[in-house]
Image: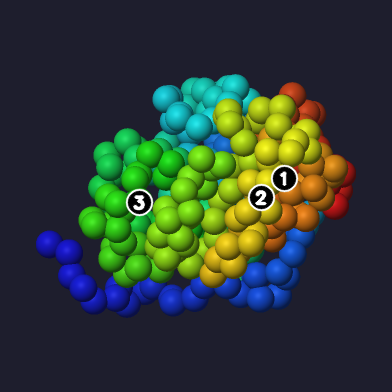
């Protein structure tokens, strides 16, 4: 039975709020797939990316049937699963990571099936113990989150990050803005992650400008199709920062030294 009390070992801090207060613009959120390229590469790569200049670290939990991920992340997830990466193993490996990364916000991005197999309470407890700040679960509807899981997330000092698309209504955007105090993930356009969406189309400009003019209480990060310095800078004109995943994974793929490749990629963005 769940209790309404705050677990004794949960530190109430909001690293997202602290980060955005220090650096309100030009934020770089970098995504890696846990267990890729090797089973035990996750924590070392997180440290490398933070040292290279990542502001937020997003850790993808590999899953066999992702909804929003494009071919690059699908392929890296397949490799990671073959390597033996699981949600349980990832949560084990992340224990102690905060001794190396005390201030960098960290997110888990995944899908509901592995979380529910573990159990939502257990997932939140272990994620919190590992120092995770937020969770992206694209297949967990906001209504279900609010009705059944929001209090659990709060008890463990976890924040749910919601995706907004060009088709999301203003009323729903404002509702999602109420349900988090992390940031809002603005999907740059139709399609999957890693798509060729870097063109500065009129529709995309209108969409991002419309969201900016809503004066939402949470910061906004743009994702999907952000691949290089030009697309990163373009996204930052309309939001607080941008999210890059597939392009980073492509840079790491097949590299003799994944850490050197990751550092070089971050330098190419900055």
Labels 1 and 2 touching (C-beta < 8 A): yes
Question: Which x, y percent locates residue 87?
Answer: 41, 41
- Badge 2 is on which residue? 208
SS of the residue at dot 1? Answer: helix
Callout in the foreground (3, 2): 2
- Cα–Cα gap, marks 1 and 2: 5 Å
**Label 3: few (<14), some (14–19) or many (≥20) C-alpha neighbours in 10 Å:** some
Q: Along the line of sight, which residue is nearer the eye, 176 or 244? A: 176
Instruction: Give the mark nearer the N terminus: 3 vs 2.
Output: 3
- Badge 3 is on which residue? 142
**Label 2: few (<14), some (14–19) or many (≥20) C-alpha neighbours in 10 Å:** many
- Badge 1 is on which residue? 205
SS of the residue at dot 2? Answer: helix
Is residue 228 shown left or right of residue 112? right
Instruction: Give the mark nearer the N terminus: 3 vs 1.
Output: 3
Is residue 195 shown left or right of residue 199? left
At x 52% / y 47%, what residue is drawn? 164
At x 45% / y 30%, what residue is drawn? 67
At x 27% / y 39%, what residue is drawn? 117
In what quadrant of the picture does the N terminus appear?
A: bottom left
| Marking on residue 266 | none
Q: Along the line of sight, which residue is nearer the eye, 17 or 230? A: 230
């Amino acid at each position: 039975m769940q209790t309404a009390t705050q677990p004794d070992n949960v530190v109430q801090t909001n690293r997202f709020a602290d980060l955005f207060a220090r650096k309100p613009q030009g934020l770089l959120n970098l995504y890696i797939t846990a267990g890729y390229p090797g089973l035990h590469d996750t924590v070392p790569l997180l440290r490398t990316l933070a040292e290279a200049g990542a502001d937020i670290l997003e850790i993808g939990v590999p899953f066999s049937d992702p909804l929003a991920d494009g071919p690059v992340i699908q392929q890296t997830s397949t490799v990671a699963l073959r390597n033996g990466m699981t949600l349980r193993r990832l949560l084990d490996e992340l224990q102690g990571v905060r001794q190396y990364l005390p201030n960098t916000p960290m997110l888990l991005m995944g899908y509901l099936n592995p979380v529910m197999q573990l159990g939502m309470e257990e997932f939140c407890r272990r994620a919190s113990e590992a120092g995770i700040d937020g969770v992206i679960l694209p297949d967990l509807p906001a209504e279900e989150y609010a009705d059944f899981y929001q209090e659990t997330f709060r008890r463990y000092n976890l924040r749910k990050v919601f995706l907004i698309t060009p088709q999301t209504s203003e009323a729903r955007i404002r509702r999602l803005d109420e349900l988090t105090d992390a940031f809002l993930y603005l999907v740059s356009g139709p399609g999957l992650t890693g798509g060729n969406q870097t063109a500065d189309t009129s529709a995309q400009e209108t969409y991002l400008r419309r969201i900016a003019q809503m004066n939402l209480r949470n910061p906004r990060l743009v994702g999907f199709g952000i691949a290089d310095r030009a697309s990163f800078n373009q996204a930052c004109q309309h939001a607080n920062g941008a999210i890059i995943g597939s392009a980073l994974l492509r840079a790491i793929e097949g590299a003799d030294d994944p850490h050197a490749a990751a550092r070089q990629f971050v330098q190419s963005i900055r």
